[in-house]
Image: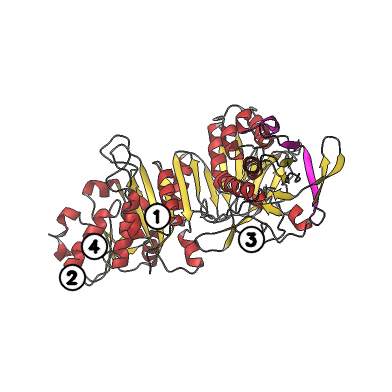
C-alpha cells in the first residue's frame, strides 16, 4: 500500500491552519503536522486593537480554533510551544525544539509549508528597550498593554507610525481615556496607502478626536524614569512626556528559516514563490506575510501582510501540497480600516505609486454621500479614482468618510480584477434604493468625471495645484459659485477669491474678464463643472474647476464649520 503523504506546516496563525484544513479535505489519509512556537493557533491578530479598546471583552474570542479542534476534528498533530530551528531540504527533515522541555528532535516531511509570518520593525531608537515600549503582534502583547492602561497612573500614550495599526490603536487608546500623540516620519497619515488630499481628510478627523499629530518628524530617543520606564519622547524639534509607547512602523517577513535552507529570497524581502506558491525547492511551499506577491496592476513583486491574503494563500497551498495545481493570481493591495468614525479604504495604486510606476494617469476627487440625501442619516464619503489616461483602465481607488466605504472598495476590487475601464465602471448595474444608494453611486460619478476629463469636456486642477498658485501669488480668479450663505459659513479666504452664485453667473458674465485664468469652486465640484461649461460656451478660454472643491480642500479654511 502506498505510503500516506506527510505534510509539515511551520506557523500556526492564518496561512498555516488554512493550508492544513484544505490539505486535510483534499488528502483525507495524509499525515499532517503543525509546528507553532506560541501557545495558540489560528489567532485573530487583526482584532488586537479592539481587544485593547474593550470592544472585544474576552481574549478567547481572538482564538478562532483551539489546538484540540485540529487534533480531534481534523486529525492533525499540533506541536505548540515548538520552534523550528532549521530545515534540511535534501533530507526532507526539520530540526525542532520543544520550548517547554528544551528537548530537540527531528521531523520528516514529504511536503513542507512555510507560514512563518512577519515581525514588527523596531527602529533603532535610543531607549527602545525601556519598560512601557511595545509592539503589537500577539495576544499577549495586547493583554500586557490592556493591563497597563488599566492602572490609574497611565494617562498618555505615544504611537510611532501613522499606518493602519497606529491609527486603529489611537482609537483604542482614546476610548480608554488616554491622551494620544502619533509621530509619523512622513508628511501625512497612512503615507503608503493614501494620497495627500485623502490622508488630510483622515488626519483632520483624527485631530478632531483629540489626537495630536506630529508629522514629518523622526523620533531621536526615548527617555526613562528612575525605574527604567519610558516617560519622554524626543524628536528633532520637540519633546513631551508619555506613559506608554507603541512602535507601529511596519513589519518585515520572517525569512530566517528559508534563508538557512537555501531558498530564494526576492528583491522585496520576502520568500520568492511562483504562481502556485511553490518556493525554489519544489517540495516547499510558502504563504502569508513571509512571501512576496505579484501586484496585479504593475506585475511587480510586493509584500502584502494581511490576514485575508494569508488565508487565500493557505487554501491554494493546501490544494497543491495534496497534488492539485491551483494558481494564486496576486493582489491589489486592498486595505480598509475603521479610524474612529471615519471608514478608510483603498485598492490598487494611489496616484503617487501610479506615476512612479510609469503610468500617465488621470484622477478625480469626488465628494458624495453613501445613499440618497433625502433619505435620513446619509453620511458623506470622498472618492478618488486613478486611471490610465490613454485607455481609461482603472489603476486604483481610495474612499474615505463617515459613510459606507467597504462596498465601494469591493466594487473597485471586482472591477480591477477584470481589467475594467472607467467607461465600464460608469455603467455597472449597481443596486439602488434610497436607503442604500443614490440613483448614481459616487463611483459612477467619479468614473464620469474621469470620462469627462478624457473627452476634454472637463478640465481641472487638484487642490494642491490651486494651493501652489495661491502661494505663488498667481494672477487668477478663484471663482466661487456657491450661495452667499455657503460663502459666509466656509470659504477659501484669499485675494483671488470672488463670489458669483451659479444662478447669477449667466447674468454676470460681463463682470469677468475673458482673458483671465479662472479656477472655479463650489461645495463638491458639481456646480463648478457646470459653471466651467457655461464659461466655455461664452468663449472664455482659460477656465478650469478645482477637483473636489471645498469638500476635498485638504488645508485650513475660513468659516464657522
For residue 384, which numbered disc appears in the image? 1
Q: Are marks 3 and 1 in contact (CB under 8 Å)?
A: no
As helix, strand or loop, the secondary structure at mark 1 comes to strand
Front of the two marks 1 and 4: 1
Residue 70 belongs to the span the image colors magenta: yes
- When the figure is inspected, residue 182 is found, relative to residue 141, above or below; the finding is below
Look at mark 2 in the image and give the residue it sits on.
539
Front of the two marks 4 and 3: 3
Tell me the crowding category of disc 4: few under 14, some 14 to 19, or many 20 or more residues within 10 angstroms, Cα based. Answer: many
Q: Quadrant of the N terminus?
A: top right
- Residue 219 visible in the snapshot: yes
Task: Point out the stretch of residues depicted in magenta.
Answer: 63-90
* Residue 252 position in % (x across, y down): 66, 53
Tell me the crowding category of disc 1: few under 14, some 14 to 19, or many 20 or more residues within 10 angstroms, Cα based. Answer: many
Return the disc, 3 or 1, that comes first in the chain's sequence. 3
Give the CA separation, mark 1 to mark 2: 30 Å
For residue 228, which numbered disc appears in the image? none
Give the CA separation, mark 4 to mark 2: 11 Å
Front of the two marks 1 and 2: 1
Look at mark 4 in the image and give the residue it sits on.
532
- For this rendering, which residue is in front, 259 or 335? 259
The reply, left or right, for residue 272 in relation to residue 327 is right
For residue 268, which numbered disc appears in the image? 3
Q: Quadrant of the C terminus?
A: top left
Amino acid at each position: 500500500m502506498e505510503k500516506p503523504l506527510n505534510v509539515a506546516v511551520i506557523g500556526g496563525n492564518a496561512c498555516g491552519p488554512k493550508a492544513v484544513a484544505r490539505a486535510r479535505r483534499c488528502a483525507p489519509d495524509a499525515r499532517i503536522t503543525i509546528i507553532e512556537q506560541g501557545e495558540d493557533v489560528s489567532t485573530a491578530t487583526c482584532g488586537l486593537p479592539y481587544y485593547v479598546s474593550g470592544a472585544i471583552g474576552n481574549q478567547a474570542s481572538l482564538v478562532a480554533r483551539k489546538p484540540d479542534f485540529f487534533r480531534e476534528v481534523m486529525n492533525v498533530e499540533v506541536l505548540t510551544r515548538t520552534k523550528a530551528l532549521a530545515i534540511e531540504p535534501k533530507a526532507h527533515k526539520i530540526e525542532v525544539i520543544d520550548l517547554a522541555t528544551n528537548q530537540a528532535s527531528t521531523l520528516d516531511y514529504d511536503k513542507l509549508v512555510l507560514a512563518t509570518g512577519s515581525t514588527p520593525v523596531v527602529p533603532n531608537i535610543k531607549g527602545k528597550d525601556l519598560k512601557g515600549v511595545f509592539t503589537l503582534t500577539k495576544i499577549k502583547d495586547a493583554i500586557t498593554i490592556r493591563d497597563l492602561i488599566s492602572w490609574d497612573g497611565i494617562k498618555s500614550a505615544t504611537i510611532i507610525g501613522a499606518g493602519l495599526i497606529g491609527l486603529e490603536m489611537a482609537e483604542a487608546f482614546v476610548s480608554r481615556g488616554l491622551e494620544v500623540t502619533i509621530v509619523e516620519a512622513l508628511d501625512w497619515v497612512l503615507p503608503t496607502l493614501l494620497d495627500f488630499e485623502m490622508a488630510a481628510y483622515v488626519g483632520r478627523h483624527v485631530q478632531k478626536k483629540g489626537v495630536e499629530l506630529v508629522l514629518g518628524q523622526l523620533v531621536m530617543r526615548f527617555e526613562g524614569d528612575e525605574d527604567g520606564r519610558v516617560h519622554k519622547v524626543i524628536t528633532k524639534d520637540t519633546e513631551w512626556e508619555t506613559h506608554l509607547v507603541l512602535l507601529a512602523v511596519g513589519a518585515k517577513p520572517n525569512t530566517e528559516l528559508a534563508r538557512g535552507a537555501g531558498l530564494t529570497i526576492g528583491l522585496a524581502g520576502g520568500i520568492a514563490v511562483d504562481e502556485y506558491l511553490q518556493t525554489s525547492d519544489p517540495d516547499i511551499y510558502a504563504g502569508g506575510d513571509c512571501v512576496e506577491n505579484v501586484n496585479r496592476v504593475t506585475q511587480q513583486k510586493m509584500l502584502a501582510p494581511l490576514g485575508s491574503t494569508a488565508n487565500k494563500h493557505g487554501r491554494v497551498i493546501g490544494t497543491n501540497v495534496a497534488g492539485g495545481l491551483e494558481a494564486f493570481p496576486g493582489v491589489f493591495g486592498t486595505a480598509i480600516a475603521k479610524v474612529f468614525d471615519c471608514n478608510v479604504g483603498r485598492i490598487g495604486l494611489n496616484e503617487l505609486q501610479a506615476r512612479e510606476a510609469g503610468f500617465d494617469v488621470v484622477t478625480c476627487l469626488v465628494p458624495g454621500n453613501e445613499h440618497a440625501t433625502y433619505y435620513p442619516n446619509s453620511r458623506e464619503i470622498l472618492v478618488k479614482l486613478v486611471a490610465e489616461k490613454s485607455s481609461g483602465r482603472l489603476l486604483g481607488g481610495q474612499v474615505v468618510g463617515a459613510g459606507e466605504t467597504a462596498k465601494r472598495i469591493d466594487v473597485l476590487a471586482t472591477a480591477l480584477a477584470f481589467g475594467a475601464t472607467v467607461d465600464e465602471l460608469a455603467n455597472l448595474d449597481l443596486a439602488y434604493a434610497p436607503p442604500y444608494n443614490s440613483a448614481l453611486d459616487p463611483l459612477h460619478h467619479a468614473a464620469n468625471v474621469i470620462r469627462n476629463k478624457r473627452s476634454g469636456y472637463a478640465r481641472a486642477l487638484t487642490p494642491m495645484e490651486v494651493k501652489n498658485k495661491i502661494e505663488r501669488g498667481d494672477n487668477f480668479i478663484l471663482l466661487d459659485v456657491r450661495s452667499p450663505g455657503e460663502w459666509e459659513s466656509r470659504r477659501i479666504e484669499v485675494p483671488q477669491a470672488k463670489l458669483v452664485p451659479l444662478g447669477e453667473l449667466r447674468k454676470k458674465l460681463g463682470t469677468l474678464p475673458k482673458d483671465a485664468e479662472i479656477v472655479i469652486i463650489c461645495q463638491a465640484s458639481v456646480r463648478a463643472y457646470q459653471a466651467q461649461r457655461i464659461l466655455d460656451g461664452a468663449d472664455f478660454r482659460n477656465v478650469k474647476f478645482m477637483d473636489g472643491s471645498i469638500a476635498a480642500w485638504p488645508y485650513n479654511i475660513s468659516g464657522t464649520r
